[in-house]
Amino acid sequence: MTKLIRGFNETNIWNLLAFLIVAATVIPVANLALGVLPGENENWRHIREYLLKDYVVNTLILFGFSGLFASLIGVSLAYLVTVFDFPGRRFFQWALILPLSVPAYIAAYTYSGMLGYTGIITRALSGLFGRDISIDIMSVPGAIFIFTFFLFPYVYIISRAFLAKYTASLIESAIMLGKNYTQIFFQVILPVSRGVIASGSALILMEVANDYGVASYFGIDTFSIAIFKVWFGMGDVGAAAHLSLYALAFIVFIILAEKAIRGQKRFAIATTKVRLLTPHRLRGAKAAIAAGYSMLVWSLGFFIPFLQLVAWSALTYEEVLDQSFLQATVNTVFAAAFCASLIVCCAAIITNSARISRSRLVRTAGKLTAVGYSAPGAVIAIGVLILFIWLNAMTELFWSYSLITSIYMLLFAYLVRFMAVGCNSLENGFEKIGKTYFEASRTLGFGVTRTFFKVDFKMLLPSMIGAFSLIFVDMVKELPLTLILRPFNFNTLATKVYEYAHDERVHHSAPVALIIIAICSISVYSLSKLDKE
Amino acid sequence: MKKFWLLTLSLFLLSTVLLTGCGGGTPAPAATKPSVEAKEVNIYTSRHYPGIDDAIYKSFTDKTGIKVNVIKASGEELLQRIKTEGASSKADIYLTADAGNLYLAKQAGVLQPFTSPALTKNIPADFIDTDKMWVGLTMRARVLVYAKDRVKPDDLSTYEDLTQPKWKGKIVTRSSNNIYNQSMLAAFIAMNGETQAKEWAKGITANFARQPEGGDRDQAKAVAAGKADVAIMNSYYLGQMLSSKDPLEVKAAESLGVFFPNQNTTGTHVNIGGAGIVKSAKNVDNAVKLLEYLSDIEAQQKFAEASTEYPVNPAVEPSALLKKWGTFRKQNINLSKLGEHNRRAVQIFNEVGWK
């Protein structure tokens, strides 16, 4: 009996902690959305009449195509590098994660530089064909291109880990039943990995939803842009809240879709026998096609823009690099590492209590963190600011410390922003582990907490480190929150890039962009090492 | 209950271990310093000419011993931050690259009036707010940039002329989200009335060579590439292209000419970068000192040379490049008008379908 009570209490404590963390991450945004009654004022009528249709259509098109293409590329490459052996496979296995290290806004600036009138690609094409040929990247298809090629690794990483560990027997059985590899991909791999694809593409769609940099530079009206314009430009909080409700509907749709896709059939592989697949060796034309496809995607998503940035850096690094960059690098790395660790711990609490709880509410609580990940950065920033002004007023009575000029406000905003990434990764981790060990341990008399540390923790550790790397990379690239919420004289690499890029001096932003890419690459590389073990 | 404390303790330990393990340890340094010193001034700025501004602040600090603390973000974002922070804001100066934003700040009630003999000496009255809430520090003109090989300067005359059918498919400019375009249309509303301004926006939209995209530089490049004949853009960006390290970009810029429109009518549209002092400012004296310094000859010269903007201080000559483009007559309106009509301008853009 005492054991029962203790177990009950423990679960409650987990739930309580999880609830507190989720509440803390949701409050800043919810506060805004609920505090303002969406109004039917003149601005709103104006938006509805002239703009709303464009916003909806553009956002849907971006969502649909970026999500579709990125998923296809991600899964097909994951299938390719795990199931087959071809020249360069070992390299591509990890190198295909690299596009994630390039911030989308930098990719957008770089590509439009290369494809602009003075750009190297335009020059090369013109030289080749003897007349001016130009590709217009600053368009909706261009934005889809950028999102696809720089975000597909979200799907790639997660489905590769899944395929490598859990599908060996399925593939072997299918071969014995006389299926060829194309049939296997469509009939076996796609269906069984739809869960991980859904969770990878949910991250992609949320990144697309919160994007401001690419859409504003390319001149595409999306919801993120609209909210910014209405609130900051027209100063109309009510109409902005109204728009946010629409945007929120998109996000809820994504979350529900993800749940539906992966929820129908739980595919937990609770087996100790993780059997690695022996890759099938490709020869001749097939090997060339496999290598060529991987090379193409890698070049477009990383190597070509990387080379261009190196070339630009050669022009400008002397002018740009100075002492302040050392400080900015230190700031960036410390803030990212600190927050990423904290988020992973919090996400472990949230996902573990979601797993052990019977309550539907707790189970879906983790999903709420998606709000922070998918809302436009500027909106979260103001939400956090309001919260901290309130906190500041409370603490002012007995503590002279000013919270709103401190770094803690920014660090907290990072938590709000990236909690969803942590939850998403760890949820997948838990799903892979399944519940059998947990149940066995509980039957043998361990409490929930003890089970977590003694049984689940070790198995979850790879997922935790994976989540850490992902969040770390996201954080190094983060821009809007840092811009608005940073304390005086606090720079990160991303804000340094912004200063030049916003002034349309892309060449000058190149050296800093390269530092960002280098730091993210290290994190990405360690992520891939981890997967191998 | 023991269990609970054990759990909490272990969680804390876990996070500490993870932190030190990942090299985190302490949150980023140089961030939290209590502001007990009065020898400082805090700026929220949307000017982002790295190097230049920082160097000017540094020489100010060297001269006066007053430390300059900076937060940079876009003008809209910073204004929102000041508004939200209210009385607890630590900002002393709000510095931005557009008169429209300064007006919005004034309207929001977050600025306070200020003046000094040095300021009125350095800055012409046109560039000072009617209620002394802000001053202009640099100026830029929104000009017509044309392809030298296809357009003769004689073909160009006014902004209004660009709505003629002969320019169909030949005009480029950036999106209406951009405050420079909004301020330009706001100026037309102020001078010619709403109906004419709307006609103008409609006419320009009908003559677009393509849907607006990219920044001002991209408009210049589109003209150089032959996609359009005339771009409406800030003089500033062409100046930057001419001083680019990329020879191709310089070559492209050299194929373009600069034309100051409306010389015989209403004058060329200009806008300013300027600053106001925040209502809740704790360091008002220091803020005034800094603005005096920024409008004085030394800083104005640096602005002019490094960023190809026009100085507002009449004692300072523009850079050699700007002088080559010649002098011009500017619109004769108080720049507060740009902000006053901003909202209507945004609406008109949406109504006529200027993306």
Image (cartoon, coloured by chain):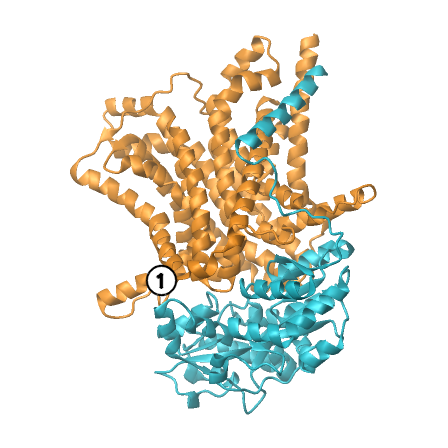
Chain colours: A orange, B cyan
For residue A55, above or below residue A369: below
Residue type, numbered disc 1: Leu
Depth check: B263 or B278 in front? Answer: B278
Q: Position of residue B14 (x, y in %)?
A: 59, 26
Give the left or right position of residue A38, taking residue A373 as reference.
Answer: right
Disc 1 element? helix
Instruction: Note whether residue A220 is visible.
Output: no
Q: Which residue is mark 1?
A: A115
Dot 1 falls on which chain?
A
Depth check: B329 or B115 in front? Answer: B115
Instruction: Note whether residue B105 is visible.
Output: yes
User: Around disc 1, counting alpha carbons within 10 Å, would you say few (fewer than 14), some (14 to 19), or many (20 or more)?
Assistant: many
Depth check: A83 or A418 in front? Answer: A418
Location of the N terminus of chain B by quadrant is top right
Q: Position of residue A106 (x, y in %)?
A: 45, 54
Give the left or right position of residue A2, taking residue A122 as reference.
Answer: right
Q: Position of residue A111 (x, y in %)?
A: 39, 58
The structure residue drawn at horizontal position 68% and vertical position 64%, both measured from the top left corner, is: B94
For residue A195, above or below residue B342: above
Furthest-left residue in this view: A284
